[in-house]
Amino acid sequence: MARLDHREAPTPEVVPVTATCVVCTQPEPDAYACVRCGITKPTEQLTAIVDMVPAARDVAHRLSAATGGSGGSGKPGSTLPLDLGATERLNAVQGELTTWVRHITAERGGTPRTVGSDPIIHSAWYLQSNLEWMRHRAEVDEFLRDVAACARVVARLARGPADRKYLGPCGAFPFDDNNDQDDQPCEGDVYVRGEGSVGRCRECGAEVARADREAWLDAEVRQYAYTAGEIAAAYPIKRNTINQWASRGRLAAHDTDGNGRPRYNLGDVLDLAAADAARRAENESKRARREVAA
Ligand SMILES: [Zn+2]
Ligand SMILES: [Zn+2]
């Protein structure tokens, strides 16, 4: 934004003085960005964000969970926090988009109409409906760069077809025994297709055995804390059951999320669920034996 400050007009209804589009440098006498760069392209990107956020959220939900920002918790061969793989990137996207929403509402007034329950989708719709205004603003080039970057992040997380499964960040796994040149862990994402047995990093092409990765991820995810609702969405355990364990003192909250909801260590919850299932099975077989005896 800084390098365009001299173009900023003093009133909210800006009359731009640029003669060319700030993106493609084609002649554009009426606005800072031409229609193709300022409307068509960001409309595609914002629509793609709306379309792909559910899949990206799904990835974040299943694998990352909020970690309270601690990160780097004893993963093999890496200090890369697992949540960098998904949740933190989605939070960053959400932060970028809502910052622009706030910027626009501060300038234009009004309250954005709420569309959908996902704040990213909500912001994307709002921004889409303000593109014409935005392309007359000096800060439009920064805005367009942010929208494009957000669309890339969401697309990378959602990664197209549903038959591709996210296997975590590449550098979090010691796939690489002979490369001693480069000590930086790769920050690419590993995906596996369909029922494939080998996952591949999109950045560096490194291959990992799916079974190893899944076992590692299961162990990783167990350490993280989730709300009862998040656990109930991902595992066959009722939210009420989790809340009951907590109120009866069988389960201690790890911390709370941004909305003050308690988060529980997933491993604790899975252990309690396994213990209850074992007890139910035991009771069943006892009753069966009694019935046979009678
Ligand atoms: Zn242009
Ligand atoms: Zn890699």
Image (cartoon, grey):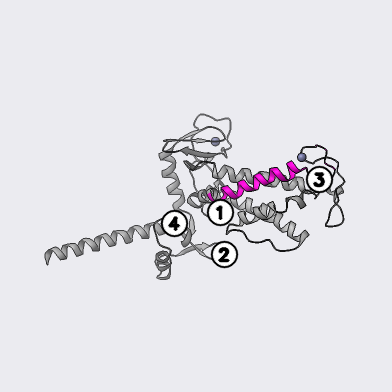
Q: Residue 254: where, in percent of width, then height?
A: 49, 62
Q: Is 26 drawn above or below residue 70 in the view shown? A: above
Mark 1 surroundings: few (<14), some (14-19) or many (≥20) residues within 10 A: few
Give the residue number, with chain letter if any, for mark 2. Answer: 259
Q: Does the magenta stretch include residue 262?
A: no
Taking 279 as reference, is 290 left or right?
left
Quick one: SS at disc 2? Answer: loop
Q: Which amino acid does label 4 sit on?
A: Leu
Q: How crowded is mark 4: few (under 14 residues within 10 Å), some or many (20 or more)?
A: many
Q: Quadrant of residue 266?
A: bottom left
- How far apart in space, not on screen, are marks 3 and 1 (Cα)? 42 Å
* Circle 1: element type: loop
From the image, tell me which residue sits under label 4.
266
Q: What residue type is labelled 2?
A: Asn
From the viewer's perspective, tell me whether residue 26 is left or right of residue 238.
right
Question: Which quadrant of the rendered structure holds the C terminus?
Answer: bottom left
The residue mark sitting in front, 2 or 3, is 3
Label ID, residue 32? 3
Q: Please identify, in this view, whether the residue under mark 3 or under mark 1 is nearer the observer.
A: 3
Mark 4 or 2, which is nearer the eye? 2
Q: Which residue lies furthest to the bottom in this view?
A: 248
Seen as rendered, the residue at the extreme left is 294
Query: Which amino acid type is shown beneath numbered disc 3?
Result: Tyr
- Say whether residue 227 is visible: no
**Image point 52% across, 65% down: which residue?**
261
Q: Residue at x 86, y 57 (%)?
A: 11
